[in-house]
Image (cartoon, rainbow, N blue to C red):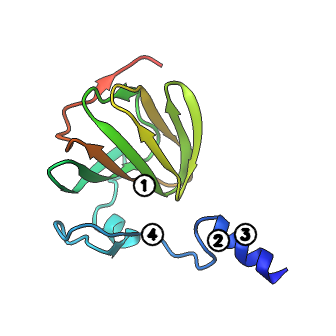
Amino acid sequence: MRLLIIAACFLAGLGCTGTTPHVFIPDQNATGGTGLEAILAAHPLPPGQNIGVLALGHTESCSYHLVQVRDREQPHLHATHDLAVTVLQGTGRLYIRGELRLMEAGDVAVVPRATPHYFVNTGAGPAAAFVVFAPPYDGKDQVPVEK
């Protein structure tokens, strides 16, 4: 029975410790290896703001960001960028090409360029995700689309 409990905790993806994920990146914004709670405390989503994007760093081929969503994104696509999303905190529904993907901390989704998508937060507080764009994202390649 004890082995079953340990296995269940492991498979839950968060272990039994209740610790939050760490974000290990090159130390460009003093965030290398900092716990998620510390990054969120240093860069909280302001009251009344729906979405916050914090650029954490970049290489020649990609950029990485902490994205917080209080309510939902509007449907959009990125015409020239592929992205990978790892949910770090919270829960939500990610729609990719209109298909529902239930997301929670630890889940990863890949969104190819020119693919319509959007996220709807279903948790009590802001959801947080680590998002990697390739090539590096300049904040300009977001094209609104109809649901």
Question: Which image quarter: residue 99?
Answer: top right
Cα separation between marks 3 and 2: 5 Å
Cα separation between marks 2 and 4: 14 Å
Cα separation between marks 3 and 4: 19 Å
Which badge, 3 or 4, is on the more N-terminal residue?
A: 3
Residue placed under numbered mark 1 in the picture: 128
Which badge, 3 or 1, is on the more N-terminal residue?
A: 3
Residue placed under numbered mark 2 in the picture: 10
Q: Position of residue 70 (x, y in %)?
A: 44, 47
Cα separation between marks 1 and 4: 11 Å
Between disc 1 and disc 4, the foreground one is 4
Which badge, 2 or 1, is on the more N-terminal residue?
A: 2
Q: Residue furthest bottom?
A: 2
Q: Residue furthest top?
A: 146
Question: What kind of residue is marked 3?
Answer: Ala
Q: Secondary structure at mark 1?
A: strand
Residue placed under numbered mark 3 in the picture: 8
Residue placed under numbered mark 4 in the picture: 21
Q: Secondary structure at mark 3?
A: helix
Say whether residue 99 is left or right of residue 81.
right
Question: What kind of residue is marked 1?
Answer: Ala
Mark 2 crowdedness (10 Å alpha carbons): few <14, some 14-19, many ≥20:
few
Say whether residue 64 is left or right of residue 29.
right
Cα separation between marks 2 and 1: 22 Å
Q: Position of residue 78 (x, y in %)?
A: 30, 30
Q: Residue at x 45, y 37 (%)?
A: 72
Residues at badges 3 and 4 in contact (C-beta under 8 Å)?
no
Question: What kind of residue is marked 4?
Answer: Pro
Is residue 95 in view from this perspective?
Answer: yes
